[in-house]
Amino acid sequence: MDEEKEKSKEQEKKPTSEEAPSPEKPKKQPKVWAKPGAPAAGPARPGVGGAGESKPPAAAQASPAPPKPAASAPPRKSPVETPTYLDISQDPLVSRIQEKFPGAVLAAQSFLGQKILTVDPLVVLPLCDFLKHDPECNFDLLEDVTAVDFPERDKRFVVVYQLCSIRRNVQVRLKCNIAENDKVASVTSVWSVANWLEREVYDMFGIIFLGHPDLRRILLPEDWVGHPLRKDYDVHKQDEDWIQRHLQIRK
Amino acid sequence: MNILVNYVVIPLVKIVVIVAILSGGIAYLTLMERKVIARLQHRLGPMRVGWHGILQPIADGLKFIIKEDIIPIKADRFVFTIAPGISLVPAFIVFSVIPFGPPDSLWGTGGYVTDVNIALLFAVAVSSVGVLGVILGGWASNSKYPLLGALRSSAQMVSYEVAMGFGIIGVLLVANSLSLVEIVEKQRSMGVWFFFVQPIAFLIYYFCGMAETNRLPFDLPEAETELVGGFHTEYSGFRFSLFFIAEYANMITVSSLAVTLFFGGWLRPFSSVAALSFLDIIPPPLWFVIKVLIFLYIFIWVRGTLPRFRFDQLMRIGWKVFLPVAMANVMVTGAILLKFL
Amino acid sequence: MITTNHYLVLAAIVFTIGVIGVLTRRNILIIFMSIELILNSVNINLVAFSYLLKNVVGQVFAIFVITVAAAEAAIGLGIIIALFRNKETIQADEIDLLKW
Amino acid sequence: MEHDIFGAIDEKTVLDANQVVINMGPQHPSTHGVLRVKLTLDGERVIDTDCIIGYLHRGTEKIVENRPYAAGVPYFDRTDYVAAVSNNLGYVECVEKMLGVEVPPRVQYIRTMMTEFQRIASHLLWLGTHALDIGAMTVFLYAFREREEILKLFEALFGARLTIHAFRIGGLWQDLPVGFLDACRRFSDTIGEHINEYEGLLTNNRIWLERTRDIGVISAQDAIDLGLTGPVLRGSGVNYDVRKARPYSAYADFDFDIPLGVHGDTYDRYLVRIEEMRQSNRIIQQCITRMPTGPIRAKAPRVIKPPVGEYYHSVEGPKGELGYYIVSEGKTSPYRVRIRPPTFINLQALKKLVKGHLVADVVAIIGTLDIVLGEIDR
Amino acid sequence: MIDQIIFYTLAFIIVAMSLMVILARNAVRSALYLISALLGFAALYIRLQAELLAGVQILVYVGGIMVLFLFVIMLVSVRTMEHQARQTRQWKAAVVIALGVAAELIYLIVRGGSIFVTKQPPDALLTKSQNTQVVGEALYSTYLLPFEIASVLLLVAMIGAVVLAKKKI
């Protein structure tokens, strides 16, 4: 499926010039996508959503060859080669960080073309400061701070920082694994956008950010007990006595 | 005996007629406003009650009467009930001095209720009393926001009153008489309307008039998006409609004064040009009504298009733009009059 | 037949009411209003005599009285506000310290 | 404590209180939803603000973790209920990228066109409410008249007007109905002069200038530091638009400009959004002329089970950069879906923008941030 | 005959309202009564053919000063004022003295009444007399100096009020 790879490579090349880049690709001729004799046997039907969708009404503009719904063939693994985490420790950015902060980058991977650096939580603040102010990296926009909960791992939470450099139009994702009641330094001093983002992570996961100017819950009520986005917090669970105290409703 | 007739019966009859016409006018002014703004905004306006919404004012009137009339608990009941009246009555009193027709019309009794020789001073003085209604209304509702709103709107009205006064002096210098009847007479004899003689004075008078009646773009106190609500937030039912009527009455008052002072009250356009005598088929009072309607249309048109001033901009313009310009206008007019006459 | 006397008596009555107001009430604002009453009673006399003697001096002087009253009201109320901002009270007899 | 001329510390009269804390919202006509702002005032000037949000928090991210991938789409309609199409586009494209599915060009063109329609609709709603807050009533009616046309187009194609479940993972639900493109062409021919109408009413209006010029100024540096994106960032002159930075869907095929402000005040953001509407219209016209034919569904596996891994995909929503960070464990439902909410981050700038302004300006500044509480609270 | 009716009703209104001013419960009520008393005075001025003065009275007093009064009453009216004793301690003595003075005054006026009524004032009602013009001329000719002094006085009052009331100077 070289066509697939060639497609993603084109996506790779980022237009750098200011005004609309003349697309390298020649003006795409509308080409009929479904090549006749496509190898895949599986009927090309949209992923069936949870609610059993009735067969979509025949599209007004009948697509060239409505595929005959084959007998319910077992869903074979799609032929596309599954993307995996590739190791990119030779990447210039990674080497530059290693040089500045030896041992900081625990793992440097890329998934589907996006750089992911797993970093030691203790060095997060100085590293972020370096990434922002270093003319070479210049990651001046912190797009997002969030966390993911993996209860089965010993270092339970993964705090994710999504960075982007507007000038160089490059993105990188920093991840650091921290255990249940570990604390991680707050990056509000580097990017002030982190203020509310970290407050939401604290609200939803209970991760404490050291040095945060005003760490309190942002979406849930102040005195709510429990952190909803943790995996052990069931979907229907509520803070019973908060509700009893404030709303006097017995579940 | 004829004193009784001349000074009691006839004015009473005229007063009753004027009040009837005025309240009818106010009712249909609300309809006119909703229709004109609707037209501005590409929609139809009230269409449901009666043909094309003709009976809408009556429906509104009934609604206000039926609506429950709440008085806040710790509010000062007496002042709470008096306040709408205080702001409504002056608007009606001013009409006692406004001439609708020539002195010899209406079987010789004169097209006006009375002709007081300080008519204009009396009109301005009485319209300044209207401010009290707003203040008392805000204070009596016994809550912080209407009080703030009342202080703001009264500060606005008081400061624009000063500028309006100077605007009127410009006209006085030319007409050198306070009686409105004589002012119209002067315009007829001079053959030109004072609008062309005193354009700046007119602009100042009209804009201050807008500010006096708390109309957009000066309607900050009632702006619903403001934190500080209007002075009549605590009012409901019939009392609220009194404030509502007071605002429209003030609008008509300002328009009719503007017409009398600057556009030759009941004179037909180019009154001195004999060739246009065919215009005389329309009786003078109708000319007056047509001109007032034009001014009311402008009021509504401005409300439809312009955004709202912020309170400090509003006050700055009142004191730092209108007042100096008005004073300059008075000086210039005085100088010219002194030099040529 | 209404003669000047009637006006003088009326003025005297209003004057006394004003004086009583000034002397008896504790609230400074009421005292202020009583002073306004006194000034107005004076005005009545002026105008009554101007009407009696057929010249306009009384009315001119009445206008000056009104301007003085306006100036005095402005200053007085300014003082009251400044006072209230410091002493939190407008009771006449509670303001008895020269320097606080 | 400052001393007045009598040397006494400032006392409190009824109205002359030094610092007053006023609650604006959660029920207030100009907070565009359930937002409560605690304003600390010194007289009329705003000293400090504190936004209290969460009234509309529905736990979308938690619910989606227990639903199959395709079932998550309707939830993302309802986060930013004013720009449902771009929400769906972001999520659907992120999943397709993880699945390695490439949608046919016709789908890409339709998706781009509808996203641009949604941008115009969202900007029209912003313009209407923003002008209404500042007092110009008529613009509100005009803007909503055009927005109604767009909603009719949505209804024709997607079946609903606001929360429309626009796209499916791997393509579209149905192809364009007959005559749809002509309707789009009719609309995009007339929207041009309608926008001139709005500009005629507002752009050179003395009072509008007075209420918006130099109100809520933010420098380019502070804007980036506060993580602002979208028209709010471009109002300060920073040229960052995801459609140009990381072209997705079919944006690489069209030429359009990115309007930039200069002073970073409310007036410049107003100009930027008005110009953006015109640029979106340009894209739509190019879409209509070059609409390719072809299937409207890619070969996607019947049961959507993206491989183990994670992906962050962001699109340029009307309010700013809308990102989706999906972590998948290879099961049928996503392990974690994180939405990067542009309005949530833009609202954080309110504290800095409002300081030192008057109460009446708070209304204008909240309007210029173009916030939607559904997305802020998620 | 009408003249009597007019005068006595106006007089009654004025006296009643002034009494209410000093007896009212809270400041706003007494302000209201004062306003009606002032309007009564204005009516009397018209009766005495001082139309300009009546206009000025309404414009300056009711439209200006009373608005100022109400502003200040609202600014300083703290609820605690209500239930405190309204009269000063020695109010009885004050009333007695005041009434004594009043009795004396009225006695003098009534006894000396004949001096004032020199001749029958013409019963000219609201004619078109040029009251305003006459007052105007007097103001600008014989009384020019007091007029200028009054304007300076007003200026000083304005500056004083601003300095006193403004918080941060």
Image (cartoon, coloured by chain):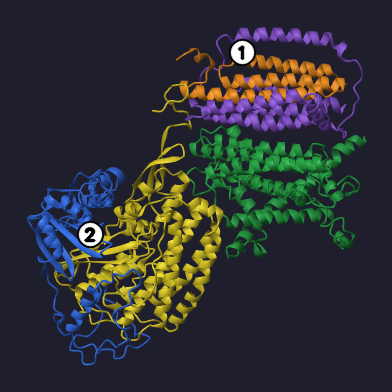
Chain colours: A blue, B green, C orange, D yellow, E purple
Q: Quadrant of residue B127?
A: top right
Image quarter hosting the C terminus of chain D: bottom left
Picture residue at 64% right of the left edge, 55% below the top: B300
Q: Are marks 1 and 2 in contact (CB under 8 Å)?
A: no
Which dot marks residue A193? none
Residue A87 lies left or right of residue D210; in this view the side is left
**Left or right side of E72 for A88:** left
Say left or right for B123 vs A247: right
**Rendered position, A6 above or below B289:** below
Residue topped by disc 2: A163
Residue C23: which numbered mark, if any? 1
Q: Which residue is at the far bottom? A: A37
Disc 2: CA contacts within 10 A as few (<14), some (14-19) or many (>=20): many
Q: Amino acid at mark 1?
A: Leu
Q: Amino acid at mark 2?
A: Leu
Dot 2: element: strand
Q: Secondary structure at mark 1?
A: helix
Locate residue B185, reporting x and y percent: 85, 47
Which one is in front, C99 or A247?
Answer: C99
- Tell me if residue A111 can be seen: yes
Q: Viewer-proximal residue, A152 or A70? A: A152
